[in-house]
Amino acid sequence: MRIVVAHNRYREAQPSGENTIVDAEIAQLTAAGVEVLPFLRSSDEIPAMSKPAKALLPISPIWAPKAQQDLDRLLVEHRPDVLHLHNPYPLLSPWVVRTAHRRGVPVVQTVHNYRQVCSSGLYFRDGVICQDCRGRALGVPAIVHRCYRGSRAQSALMATTLAVHRPTWRSVDRFIALTSAVADHLRDYGIPDERIVVKPNAIPDPGTPAPLGEGFLFLGRLSPEKGLDLLLEAWRRHPDGALGPLRIAGDGELRPLVEAAAAERADVTFLGPLDRAGVRAALAGSAVVLATSTWHDVLPTVIIEALASGRPVLGTALGGIPYLVGADAPREPAGTGPAEVASAPSGSAGPALPDGIEPGEAGWVVAPEPAALAAALPVARAGAAALAPAARARYERIFHPDVVTKRLIDIYADVARAPAAR
């Protein structure tokens, strides 16, 4: 099987989980015997572009002529079975879908965000969830609020791009939704159920989990949408030391907030940014991992890392978090289209839980409110040991690279065999 993987890499100055996932997926496919033809561009190329090339940048999200010419040559020369698209902006453009279809090559796209509808891709603005552009032919609210890169002009361009390429997106042969929440987003956008497959990302197997540690770990970007305000307010509702330690790792604009909390309470420790060895050590020293996002977080990789390390997760009931911990209701496939990865039923979290705490196979989810999270913290502390084996088992069954790569190859084969949806 021969696959073109198309991706516009995000700038290295802004570390991107999407770049990491694409690199890992290419490596996993290659190791499985798939011939991968990377078709990659990077936003880091922009400063070194010639003046004529830079002059065309404003239209490149709609139509990037150089990328189309290069892709067309690759398709003609190598005759791939499938083109797998990740991020097209700004140097590839969704037009690569049309270029592939013109050469008879079916297209699969992994949906990493909500940018079919939302110019920022986040459904999040000014500290709260925002879906003002949902259902609109043109995302005027995105222009008014400068949602794309803080610029009204660039927001107008992105809103126009989304409007122009609505038919392009609807011609994609198969969408890979990372979670059931993303699948629901695509259905709301008008994509037929039989053209949606839920396939999460994978992370490498860290090996046999270490014995359960103590306390809670928050690991991620220290930014408003990750819910640090929510977490710290919930934590303060318990006496100092009552829940064991809270360790917070990462960096970002809310670092001063975390440093102040660590100075205020003996049970809060700020670990700062960690390398991979530091992340492994922090996971080994914890009992529960926290995912307290206040936006519809698509697929927080830290949850998969927690499950791989045999650590249950306490998270908010937003975005892909319920799916990841096994707290969402399984959806039956419609017709013959595989709309959902098989998922085991939710596990038991022990005795009856307080109202508002939903148990999952590998953790718990609550509403993104301080009172609900405060009530769930002692529940998670008490139930961590019981759910730790289930967390590791869920990783092995759903998020292990061997499982996910086989699933992806099956998707390619199915799309290559099927009549084109376009």
Image (cartoon, helix red, strand yellow):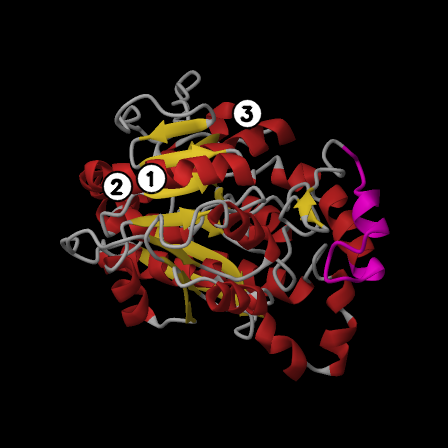
In front of the other: label 1 or label 3? 1
| Front in this rendered view, residue 103 or 195 | 195
Element at label 1 = helix
Mark 1 or 3 closer to N-term?
3
At label 2, counting other C-alpha atoms closer than 10 Å, the crowd grade (few under 14, some 14-19, many 20 or more) is many
Which residue carries the number 3 mark?
192
Which disc, if any, is residue 380?
1
Numbered range of the magenta stretch: 136-154
Q: How far is disc 3 from disc 2 in space, using C-alphas?
A: 39 Å
Q: CA distance from mark 1 to mark 2?
A: 6 Å
User: Horizontal and vertical percent for residue 23?
Assistant: 38, 63
Amino acid type of the residue that numbered disc 2 sits on in the rendered structure: Ala
Q: Position of residue 174 (x, y in %)?
A: 48, 36
Magenta segment includes 144: yes
User: For the residues marked 1 and 3, what is the alpha-carbon distance in whole angstroms?
Assistant: 38 Å
The kind of secondary structure element at disc 2 is helix
Which residue lies at the image location 49% right of the left edge and 30% below the top edge?
A: 195
Given contact means CB atoms under 8 Å apart, are the residues at marks 1 and 3 in contact? no
Residue 354, by quadrant, is: top left
The residue that mark 2 highlights is 384
The residue under label 3 is which amino acid type? Pro
